[in-house]
Amino acid sequence: MNSYVQQLCQIAQQPSRRIIGLMSGTSLDGLDVALCRITGAGPAMQLELEYFTTVPYTDAFRNEIRKVFAKSEINFRQLCVLNPYLGRQHGQMVLACLADWGVAAAEVDLLASHGQTVYHAPQKQHGLPHFPNATLQIGDGDHVAVTTGIITLSDFRQKHLAAGGEGAPLAVYGDYLLFTKPGENRILLNLGGIANFTYLPGTADAAAVFTTDTGPGNTLIDALARQYFDQPYDQEGAIAARGHIHPGLLHYLKQHPFFEADFPKTTGPEVFNLHYLQEAQQRSGTTSVKPEDLLATLTRFSADTVVQAMRHFLRADQTYQLYASGGGAHNPVLMRHIREQLPGCPLRRTDELGIPGDAKEAVLFAVLANETVAGGGTDFGGREGVPSISMGKISFPG
Ligand SMILES: Nc1ncnc2c1ncn2[C@@H]1O[C@H](COP(=O)(O)OP(=O)(O)OP(=O)(O)O)[C@@H](O)[C@H]1O
Ligand SMILES: CC(=O)N[C@H]1[C@@H]2OC[C@@H](O2)[C@@H](O)[C@@H]1O[C@H](C)C(=O)O
């Protein structure tokens, strides 16, 4: 037997595993690195977050990714060279974290690497009749594995597509295992570049979970902050707080087929970008609105579309507890707009459930890898968007 297969079998049989989850999201702020100790698998699983770090990207690194990021036309050579480069860079970032934490690579059982989404194209969005839902993550797992010497699972989204999904959101799989609480209907809201949520019924019934993207989270806010204020994002929502919401522009921003489409659905910065804003400004005759008013309006746009998607299925005879994660949970203006429109649903952060909101997505990939190697028995029924599958391709370091 190949010694790595043997090693993998042994890891699968251990009572607990140390798994590093890696996530680099649509915000391109950095690589989230979460070292988790996971005991068992499936609903009985226990997770302890041992260490968490976000390794910030340099401007140069970010700019290399931006050359292909969410663009329908690119330099193909750039994409080709980025794929191994990103894998190696992510591997190096993991090694740097391990050195900081005083943990040897040999003490880690598995790495779970999301890679970098460079293009997301569900069929509803690309509209090409003969082509399926598609999404592309780069930063090949073989390079991560060889760089770190740790068995690596990667490219998690392709199986979801193969099983009929849109390749996202995957958070639902981790959310179900980590946060289900019998007797309490929970909604896990992630305010990343794109916003999404998971509904976890108080019945703990896996076949009744629900998940969807809702539209932009921070992606438009960040793009505008970069364009007009030379800042990576609107820190603490300070710019939005001094601007005024423009109702006419807000109305036009909400006019996109994505918001009318059936749930579940997914999207990305391929749609929600500065070009989208400019078109809405032209259609609404608001091209001379002040930048801080644009930011205030975009923040409200994100909040309204989150709330609109949630209201679609909230039932008046039920109560719900909301838990936010992702960078947008640090934006008090965004959070206030959501809170005010859902007065019956207390909105807290996942930090109160023991997982810091900034770490949640990286932790998710560690959970997915754990399930693929040691679990995978959860039956999500025939729920659309939540196929019962194991995800991640396995790369050996040698
Ligand atoms: N203190 C803060 N004030 C306001 N916004 C913040 C703050 N901290 C982070 N953010 C926002 O959060 C973003 C990063 O969020 P996050 O890391 O969750 O995104 P991501 O994981 O890249 O996105 P996605 O989940 O869509 O893949 C920043 O770009 C910024 O918009
Ligand atoms: C294709 C892709 O990378 N989608 C991301 C993105 O960022 C947020 C939202 O859009 C979410 O659907 C997804 O990531 C998280 C980790 C998910 O799959 O749950």
Image: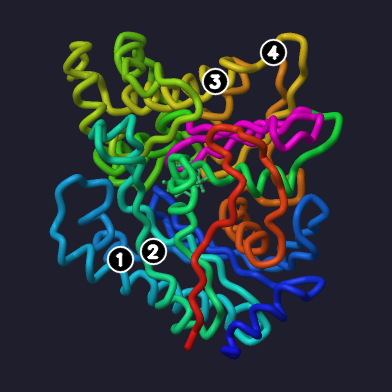
Q: Is residue 59 left or right of residue 165?
A: left
- Residue in front for this viewpoint, 367 or 348: 367
The residue under label 2 is which amino acid type? Tyr
* 208 falls in the magenta region: yes
Q: Quadrant of the N terminus?
A: bottom right
Q: What x and y, as percent, mark residue 158?
A: 43, 53
| Residue where numbered disc 3 is placed | 307
| Residue where numbered disc 2 is placed | 57
Q: CA distance from mark 4 to mark 2?
A: 42 Å
Q: Residues within 10 Å of mark 2 (few under 14, many from 20)?
A: some
- Residue in front for this viewpoint, 194 or 289: 194
Q: What x and y, as percent, mark residue 361?
A: 57, 52
Q: Earlier in the sequence, mark 4 or mark 3?
A: 3
**Residue beneath the point at 36% across and 17% down:** 254
Residue 333, placed above or below residue 52: above
In this rendering, the label closer to the viewer, 1 or 4: 4
Q: CA distance from mark 2 to mark 1?
A: 6 Å
Please give the label number shown on residue 61: 1
SS of the residue under disc 2 = loop
SS of the residue under disc 3 = helix
Q: CA distance from mark 3 to mark 1?
A: 35 Å
Q: Is residue 271 left or right of residue 173?
A: left
Callout 4–callout 2 Cβ contact below 8 Å: no
Q: Residues within 10 Å of mark 3 (few under 14, many from 20)?
A: some
